[in-house]
Image: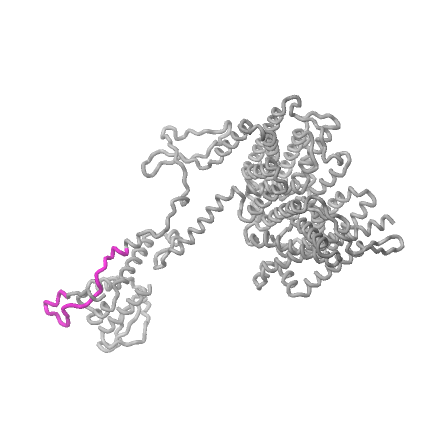
Amino acid sequence: MSEANWRNPIFLWGAKGVVESLPTTPFRSHQEIWRSTRKSKTKLFSVGRLRYYYKWRGHGAITWRRLRYWPTRRRVLRVRGEYNPKNLRREKTIVDKRPIWWAFGFIALALGPLFTPIDLQNTLLTAGATFGIYAAISLCWMLIIGTAGIISLATYAAVGTAAFCTAILSIKFALPWWLLPPIGTVVGLLFGALIALPATRLDGFYYALLTLGLNELCRVYFSTSKIFGSATGGLYGADTYIPQNSSQFGQLLVGYYACSALMLLALLFYRLVDGRRLGRILRMAPEKREAFAEATGVNFRQARLVVFLISSAALGFIGGFYTSNFRGVAFSIFNFDTVLLGVGMLVIGGIGRAEGAVVGTLIVVFLDRVLITLGPIRLIIIGLIMLSVVLYLRDGLFGIKAQFRNWRDKKKSERRSTRAEKGGEMLPEEATETHDKDIVYMRRFDKMQRDYLKTLVSSEVIEEHRRSPQGQHSEALQRLLIYFRTRPQVDKYAIAIVELFKAYRIVALSGQRGVPPRVVEDRIYPTQKEAFHGVFLRRVQDLLES
Amino acid sequence: MDALFIISNAIVLASIYGTLAIGISITWSSLGLVNLAYGFVFAFAGYGAWLVAQHISQWGPVVLGAGIASGSLAGIIICALAFIPIHDKPNFTIRGLIATLAINLLGTQSLLWWFGPRSKSLPEIFGTWKITLPGMVLTADKVGNVATSVLMLFFVLRWMQASRRGLEIRAMMMNPHAASIVGIGVRRTAFYVMAITGGLAGLAAVLLSQTYYIGPYGGLTPMIKGVSIALCGGLGSVRGAVIAAILLGLNEALTSAFFGGQYVLITQFLFIIAILLVRPRGIAGILDRAREA
């Protein structure tokens, strides 16, 4: 360090006590600190840091043209219009792309039968029809569990009861197929009203356990009573909407499209209940915040009951449709495994969203009905998927995106907090709270300045100051002194005269008028020069410690 | 004669289902887990006892012990899979419920896959003797069932009252948060609880297999009966479960005597619903002291 020498310019004038040259700290540019501070130390990944939206071109003249569902004011796509801040071009961003995915899904559903291989046609179209029915059931169940928040496991019991009642009516009285769903609706409504009675009094798990028992009750009752065909494993022979005289492929196709239409109806029903008044009311009163909702005048109990009842009626409708689709119904609809698979359908997709119910149903029905040759293994696979979804995902498959973003934000803020050098500058959280943003920049500049000045402190500089606290100084020492002298008054060191020319001591100014300085140390300095140097040493120490 | 026979049957069933119900009740109140994988524990314990009876010994106590041990093992598996990973995560209660349902599906199907759909039967562990009383005949399995389950329950409850571990479990039942603050390990206690309740279920499985067969789906009915009894008695209350078991056993006996066997479940659920409408937390449950999920 000591190669550098500073030549005192006033030596030539023969000033008193001035040496010609003194060792000093070698020159360092203050730009180095600036550059190294400005340099980004963050490891950058090319993918996945920002949300990417494709920017569609807009036209200023058609800014207010919107595609709407007639006759409502609802828009088909949520599109945000904005001006690019850089080139002021009109841009459009599709905020919510879900309608597009739904449209693709519906097109795939409609065109599916055209692309099934001939040898798999029977399996796939039957599975497709089953998928439609089960997706409709899952959607209604999702309304009960997700929207109304009633954990009911008696959904398949409601469907099965309606199916059995309509089947027996159809067989006994030769009712036509189109009467079965309406009758099923009535049966479902009655069933729902019956099991809604305890739901008014019991909370979540008590009700879940009770409905589990009710499901078993239905199974035992229907499978042991003689009129429902306890010997044959089910009740068959009801009227069906599928034309019996057409070809097998035609029958399959009619069944497939009818079940798909049922699913569309269920989706519409879900949208009408969840997306409108009832859904809003219930979203206002989520679990553990019911008291608040009640206090604001929201009658969430009534809304829950209404959702439960109309969902039960819809389940009854599906039950009637089930009978007219399969010409009857088997006891297996009351099986505990059916309930488990149904729960799996809801859980895999994610509770509380329509797309979750449909995709979960698709996965489960595919594994259960298409891969039927696997035997019990396919149910084991479904169980494994269900278990891993419950253990690892907070909100099913469709919650992955939000969960991943949360996790990434958590990691980001963890890394940021490890990166932050705490040298007096503000942390991001503090900076956003500060009203005067100049303080943020001032503190940042101060930090860099101190970093730079720390590199100037050396034994040579201290020795130079000891020799002559006042007068001409080398550049390094001068920079340090200017910095020290420009500090604010609060806690600034000063020299108090104990006895003139004999005793001095270091004090710290209070910075407030009327408040005396405090004594920093007991040490008494015999001369003013030594006291100056004492102050300098304290300031250097404070600088190095900061 | 007939009524006495039905009543004695009902007592036997009540003592077995009561054993299960107490297990469910303790699990819920100490861990906050609604264990719907009891069907699997039940079937697993039955198959464990059957394997031991096939390959090691037919002697009664050994078979019983094997059933209890394999029930405990199944309980520990469930604890490791469904409680340990998620017990401190959001929405634990509903996720735990669904996880146990998934384990039930997995376990039942694995048993079906491994052992096949044919049901197995255990040897008669209590022998074939009889006691003839005026008016009724008590067979060995009836007396044995009641005696064993009452004994086992007595020992478990005594252990819970007298031992250090039992004290920990009871502390968890009262207030899990405070228990963890005073240094009771939640996870360790969970393993004890699940092992013990699994053992109770295993005992019930072996006892019940004296009357019914062992099959992959054989655990379902006992589980639903146990859940109903626990629900009716008040989740978390041992005394309530005992009262509910006796009441439901009586109901079963009376219904089958007066109306016929197929109405048992209907009257049973009407009875439970009636009780729950009057007391939403069950016979011995108190609204304020119920576990806050």
At horizontal 23% and vertical 59% (from top left) the residue drawn is: A28
* Left or right of A98 in this view: A151: right
Quick one: B189 or A252, which is closer to the camera? A252
Q: Is residue B283 above or below residue A161?
A: below
Residue A146 x/y as whole percent: 58, 42
Instruction: Place residue A179 in its image quadrant.
Output: top right
Residue ranking furthest to the front: B55
Residue B69 x/y as whole percent: 68, 57
Is residue B192 at all visible to an observer of this figure? yes
Is residue B233 at all visible to an observer of this figure? no
Residue A212 x/y as whole percent: 67, 44
Q: Is residue B231 above or below residue A341?
A: below
Q: Give the total number of marks visible in the rendering.
A: 0
* Left or right of A311 in this view: A103: left
Magenta range is A8-33
Question: Within the magenta stretch, is there residue A17?
Answer: yes
Residue ranking furthest to the top: A245
Question: Within the magenta stretch, is there residue A386?
Answer: no
Residue A50 x/y as whole percent: 40, 44
* Left or right of A399 in this view: B198: right
